[in-house]
Amino acid sequence: MASTLSVFALLSTVSYLTHSRAEDRLGSGFADQLMVLTELPSHRNELRRIDAFADNYLTTRDRVWLQRRADLARGFAASHARIGALMHDPEERAEWDEIGREFLLYDSSQLALFRRAASGNLTRVEAIRQAIDNETVDRHIERMSHFGRLSFVRLDARRRAAREAALFTFAAVLGFGLVGSLAVAAAVSRIVLKPVARLRAQAGSWHLGEPWTLDMKDGPPEVRDLLSAMRSMADQLNAQFERERQAGRLKSQLVSGVSHEFNNALAVIHTAHALLKENEPTTAASNPWHEMLAANIRALSTMATNLLNLGRLEAGKFDLDIQRVDAATILRGAVSRLEILAQRKKLAIKLDVPSAELPCAGDPDALSLVVANLFTNAVKYTHEGGSIVLGAAAAAGGVEIFVADTGIGVAPEDQEKIFGGYYRSEAGKREAKGFGVGLALSRMILEAHGSDLELVSEQGKGSRFSFKLPPFKGGAADLRA
């Protein structure tokens, strides 16, 4: 097999180099011939303009036309020489030189005519007759046009030659390639492909957590090394998978336990606070403390509920009860429950909802939790004296709900990370406390609704969180909208 490949490589290299040289020569000639054809129209136009300037001088005797004609004649001679340098065929070059000599004779005869006109030996009638007579120029132009047609024929001949050379090289390489490929294919199929097919079948049927069962005694050393590496990788993945599963189970148990304990403690604190307000008269001095207690009880209750529900979502135990929901009602409820949090920081709260209902499909309790999370976050990360807007409006395909603030904003590199769960940006850590689960929980709840939580934010100027809900159609919700 090695000798076959060596011969094939050598013959292919020789064929390629031979064809490459021929192709370079043909390509260079092809390009020059194409350039000649490109230059010919403008070259003919220059000759027409030379004749027109001569006619203008003969009829007006204005030396401006004589100067313009002289400049154009020099340019014509230069372009004629430049085009001739692109021609490689001796016959073609000789014909082009003959056209150049004819132009020189034509130019000399016109210069003699100009001298007669300057000396006054050329009457106006003769000058007009000479201006009308374009036979010589037409003959030159027709000869250049004929030359262009011949050049096109030569160009087509070069194209056919290049194609024939390419086909010959292709046929030679293809023939050698077929012979070498058959020999290589037979060897590869017997030595490599069958063991690789067995390895691929094992890899395709293997699942994370299962042992690697394939063992191979035959096959090339490279395939056996690959098998050993894949078996080792499978063992490492299984070990890591088991550690992650145990850690996830422990985390879920810990989160669930802590959340329950939080809720129990908060229930006791809430009850004690309610009894205290009921049995003790509220004074101007004690009222701020009551408001502080109520706000912190609500904030801790939201954190505990988020942790508990996040654990349920991750465990697949969070079920939605989709029904008809009024988006405006959800927002009004969030403001009435949580407005006390904003009052402590002197934040301006605006509710931007229409007077009519905005019916959509969703779980009212789950959506209330999402809006509460977004509102609580807006309060936490907006400085004192800022503003928060909660709004809803009809949108294409349903209803859009949003919460916008004038807070610290989110850096571009953190905008996706904050939805991952248990992540908080450095700016967020400095601004307020929390676990970093509210946005992750909100996105998971919205994904269960067939929606997504979107963020538009700029650091130092605020953030806008929004999501869309499908319309509620009759007795069934269409979450595919």
Image (cartoon, rainbow, N blue to C red):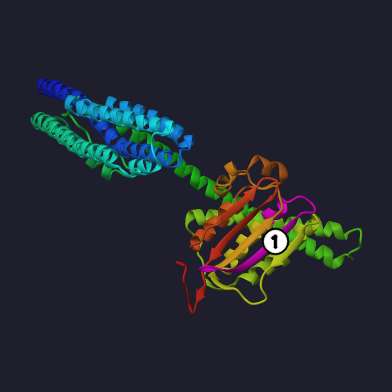
Residue 99: give x, y in percent of width and height: 25, 30
Residue at figure coordinates x 79%, y 61% from the top left:
273
Regarding mark 1 in the picture, which secondary structure is present there? strand
Query: Which of the pair 179/444 is nearer the observer?
Result: 179
Mark 1 neighbour density, 10 Å: few (under 14) some (14–19) many (20 or more): some
Residue at figure coordinates x 52%, y 72% from the top left:
471
360 in relation to 291, above or below: below
Residue 449: give x, y in percent of width and height: 50, 64
Residue 122: give x, y in percent of width and height: 38, 36
Q: Is residue 286 magenta?
A: no
Query: Which of the pair 13/207 is nearer the observer?
Result: 13
Query: Which of the pair 208/382 is nearer the observer?
Result: 382
What are the residue bounds of the magenta stretch? 376-398
Residue 115 visible, this orientation: yes
Decide if residue 28 is on the left or right side of residue 446.
left
Query: Which of the pair 190/294 is nearer the observer?
Result: 190
Residue at the outermost bottom position: 474
